[in-house]
Image: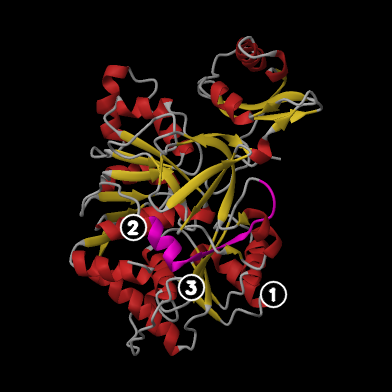
Amino acid sequence: METIKDILNYAAEQYGKNPAFRYKRGDEIAEKTYDDLKHDTEAFSAALGARGFLGRHTAIIGATSYEWIVSYFGTVNSGGVVIPIDVLLSPENVCELLDRADAEVFVYDKNHIKTAELAKEICPKIKLYIPTEGDELSVAGMISEDNPAVDVDIDKDKMCAILFTSGTTGKSKGVMLTHFNLTENVTNLDTHIKPNTVSMTVLPIHHAYCFSMDILKSLSLGTTICINDSMMRMVKNMSLFKPQTMLLVPMMLETLYSRLRNIPPEQRGAAAKQVFGGRLETIFSGGAYLDPIYIDRFKEMGIDVFQGYGMTECSPVISTNMEGCQKNQSVGKLMPNCEAKISDGEIWVKGTSVMQGYYKMPKETAETLEDGWLKTGDLGYIDEDGFVYITGRKKNLIILSNGENISPEEIENELSRNDIIKEIIVRGKDGVIEAEIFPDEEFNKGVENIKDTLQGIIDDLNLSYPPYKRIARLIVRDTEFEKTPSKKIKRT
């Protein structure tokens, strides 16, 4: 398999009558088989062809839905380029990305009608607007049309997706990924998941980690993918769909654990089954660093957590822990199609999943790619067994006046193990180290002076650090930090 089209054709051939997707439709649960997915994807391609829009740039915005997925596959499998857009962006920011990505087709859900209306006013490149639902021109309507089939030969090295990085700092960049980039990332990862395993997708679908692993990888394995319709109903939907495996970001893992941490340890296993739907066995964690303590905590409840590492620019998985091949302190073993080296403490990677570059940003591309090596921006090391360890972000490094380099993530990880600390950023400011903390409201009930309590925790940690590494200033927040779609705190 070298293209996304190959994956869908293989999946339909192997698992045709098996359920590919389940999702709520009103009070009912709708189901689509692998044969349905192939048919509907090809029907969407044919509908684009009938309107003269084969091979164009198609932007998609909306919550995870069967129609979103069909429009993605229907676009790329007929030679087009897809641009998944973050649902949290303002209409103005969406239109800016539509223009930068040269979108000519815009697919949107009912929550983004105003965005589509603004685009019609200020985005002249867009010629075709397609709502996901509706009786007339819509994704649902297009796949029911009887148009002549189209069969486009796909070049595996052709760009098929532009994914805008959310980034914790700076302007978003359009990562150019090919069919081969994404397919290699899927086929080189062995998750030990069997056909008909039930998963539930909860992450934002425009995010590389969600689409590549939750959707594309799962389809290649014959998984039944259940679509979570709302983060507010995630736990309720786990009881409804009863997933066996899930992909989560660390913040979600921490939130789920918070529902159980006040339960006596000997009762947590039974409580976890009730909260997680009764069948959850495996969680894959990515998007940010997960404190290994949560791997142990979930293991005690009968759930295996495997932490991985990646970035959009690498389609996205670079390394991952797996069953029988795991070191809890690491972010996993390098993928078979990926090699890595350390340059001045920074992890550089090379392989078949590395992007082509940033769309229409040659300067930024040249800064990030060097002789085929992708500069990840992450600091760390690789052990003799090929396991990757992350120690921090290069751009976050605190460089003190005495020449000492401090990784803020190391200090943040130590402090965040205290239950009364919900979120934290450590930074260098005015020549000293500063910690900004958002306390956990549940654990702070009854605490007379939050700042004094937090200062005591910092003082205890400072005793174990050399003088130059100690936190000199504390700021206590009243609100959560602003975050990216992958739930990373935005640093300012």
* Labels 2, 1: front one: 2
Label 1 to label 3: alpha-carbon separation: 29 Å
The three-letter amino acid code for the residue at tag 3 is Lys
Q: Quadrant of residue 435?
A: top right
Q: Which residues are magenta?
A: 169-185
Label whose residue precedes the other's in the sequence (3 or 2)? 3
Determine whether the residue tagged by mark 2 lies in a helix, strand or loop: helix
Asked whether the residues under the numbered discs 2 and 1 touch, taking CB atoms below 8 Å apart as contact, a structural biologist would say no
Q: Residue at x 21, y 50 (%)?
A: 194
Does the segment drawn in magenta span residue 173? yes
As drawn, which residue projects farthest toward the left? 17
Q: How is the image coloured?
A: secondary structure
The mark lying in front, picked from 1 and 3, is 3
Image coords of residue 205 (percent x, y): 45, 56
Q: Which residue is mark 3?
A: 158
Q: Label 1, on which residue? A: 122
Amino acid on which the number 2 mark rests in the picture:
Thr
